[in-house]
């Protein structure tokens, strides 16, 4: 009697007597290894998915970012500051320039002296840096305009949010802080001038507090 043969990467072979239909009877060779490999792939998939579910799909552990999008107006700045070059390309931590964020209510704007600490020697021929140098030589700070703002009756503090999502967050490293900043500010590391892309209203904040077990006492946010 004739025999047929079909091999799948050396794990599964179809060899055996050929019936009237012309299809060989199955014969498994090395099927144990095939099933082990398949089980490992399935297990790896579910482990990856469980990790994504645990961090809300953002990559930040123990955190669920609030849902909400917003199309803010373009705010013209005295210098078109390229966040993308500083954060995404050169990997400068947000808190290097916004030094107050980790210890106070506001994130703060870096003094011109901090900018010039690099740009006395870096990219001095670029138009943006020439403009920055003019401010420096005149001893005047650029008149930066606020992009992300909340009403005066809202008490938001960067310090407590960074403490919860970065410093006291097990498995979260400080060098990944842009991922946390993106919760409220969007992917600033992909922008030049910052652009408001999150609503920053009460519903937005309440959804975040609910998802991340934040306080719901009115006086926490309204002083």
Image (cartoon, rainbow, N blue to C red):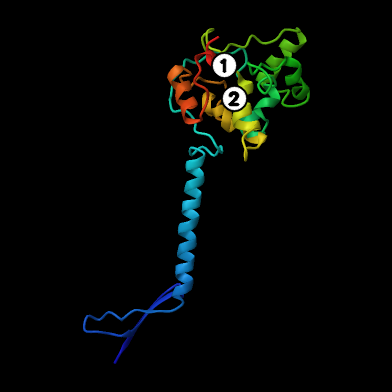
At which x and y percent is residue 146?
57, 12
Left/right of residue 107 with respect to residue 62 in the rendered view: right
- Quick one: quadrant of the N terminus? bottom left
In whole angstroms, how far apart are the C-alphas of marks 2 and 1? 9 Å
At x 51%, y 37%, the residue is 58
Left/right of residue 202 with respect to residue 115 in the rendered view: left
* Vertical comparison of 65 with 220: above or below: below
Quarter of the figure with residue 181: top right
Left/right of residue 163 with respect to residue 30 in the rendered view: right
Disc on res. 134: none
From where the camera sits, is residue 25 visible?
yes
Q: Residue furthest left?
A: 20
- Quick one: quadrant of the C terminus? top right
**Which residue lies under the disc numbered 1?**
156
Secondary element under disc 1, as helix, strand or loop, is loop
| Label 2 vs 1, first from the N-terminus | 1
Tell which of 177 and 209 is nearer to you.
209
Check disc 1: other Cα within 10 Å, few if <14, some if 14-19, many if 20+: some
Q: How many marks?
A: 2
* Vertical comparison of 168 with 119: above or below: below
Check disc 2: other Cα within 10 Å, few if <14, some if 14-19, many if 20+: some
**Which residue lies under the disc numbered 2?**
161
Secondary element under disc 2, as helix, strand or loop, is helix
Quarter of the figure with residue 144: top right
Tell which of 206 and 215 is nearer to you.
215
């Amino acid at each position: 009697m004739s025999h047929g043969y079909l091999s799948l990467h050396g794990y599964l072979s179809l060899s055996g007597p050929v019936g009237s239909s012309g299809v060989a009877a199955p014969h498994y060779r090395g099927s144990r290894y095939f099933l082990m490999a398949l089980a490992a792939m399935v297990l790896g998939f579910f482990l990856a998915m469980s990790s994504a579910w645990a961090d809300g799909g953002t990559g930040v552990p123990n955190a669920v970012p609030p849902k909400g999008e917003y199309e803010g107006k373009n705010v013209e700045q005295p210098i078109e500051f390229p966040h993308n070059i500083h954060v995404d390309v050169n990997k400068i931590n947000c808190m290097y320039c916004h030094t107050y964020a980790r210890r106070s209510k506001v994130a703060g704007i870096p003094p011109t002296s901090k900018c010039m600490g690099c740009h006395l020697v870096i990219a001095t021929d670029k138009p943006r840096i020439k403009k920055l140098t003019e401010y420096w030589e005149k001893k005047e700070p650029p008149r930066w305009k606020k992009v992300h703002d909340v009403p005066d009756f809202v008490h938001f503090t960067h310090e407590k949010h960074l403490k919860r999502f970065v410093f006291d967050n097990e498995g979260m490293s400080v060098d990944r802080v842009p991922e946390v900043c993106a919760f409220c500010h969007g992917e600033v590391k992909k922008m030049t001038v910052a652009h408001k892309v999150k609503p920053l209203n009460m519903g937005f904040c309440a959804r975040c507090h609910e998802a991340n077990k934040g306080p719901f006492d009115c006086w926490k946010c309204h002083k």
